[in-house]
Image (cartoon, grey):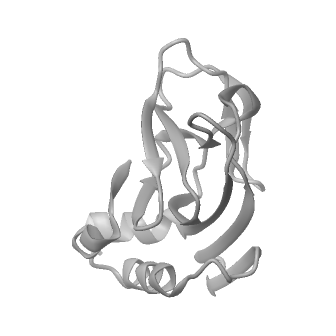
Amino acid sequence: MLFDSLLNADGYFTGDWWRDTLAYIRAATPALPDGVHPVRSDALVARVHSGHTRQASDAALKSHRTYVDVHVVLEGAETIAVWPVGPLRVRTPYHAQQDVAFYERPDTPGTRLVLAPGLFAVFFPQDAHMIQLMDREQRAIKKLVMKVAVALVDRERSGC
């Protein structure tokens, strides 16, 4: 998992996929329509969603295997809780077509981050995340999630 200011984002990766991801994020505004926006066919996709934050009891704990998620809030703020996948109990096994597995909420608290405009979080396959959690009260939120094919990230990590 990565969590940082967008001002520092350029230093994390050097691949074209990261430059394209950051360019899309930096150009995005709250006026961007909800929905799926292909950036590089299926390898890099932007998903925009408007909604509200919620209580943890109403949220799902999930992870992905095919895509790395880059989360950015365009408007509002949310709390995200994160746990390592390893010790979690699976609630719904991985579904390849939807690229998601769901987990039982553990008794131990996860790492909590507050995501607001100007910040970003990156969740890798080993990071189970529970998103759009409310702090004290429910808030409207508009967010952008860049779905980056794991193969693109792995290629950079291996030096190919």
Residue 65 appears left or right of 158 = right
Number of callouts? 0
Residue sitting at the far front: 137
Q: Quadrant of the C terminus?
A: bottom left
Residue 90 appears left or right of 33 = left
| x and y, in percent, of residue 118 in the image | 40, 68
Q: Identify whether 143 is placed above or below 115.
A: below
Q: Identify whether 19 is placed above or below 125.
A: below
The residue positioned 63% from the left and 75% from the top of the image is 46
Query: Which residue is nearer to you in this view: 93 or 77?
Result: 77
Residue sitting at the far left: 11
| x and y, in percent, of residue 56 in the image | 66, 29
Residue 152: quarter of image: bottom left
- Is residue 53 visible to us here? yes
The residue positioned 68% from the left and 39% from the top of the image is 101
Query: Which residue is nearer to you in this view: 31 or 125?
Result: 31
The residue positioned 62% from the left and 19% from the top of the image is 89
The residue positioned 54% from the left and 67% from the top of the image is 149
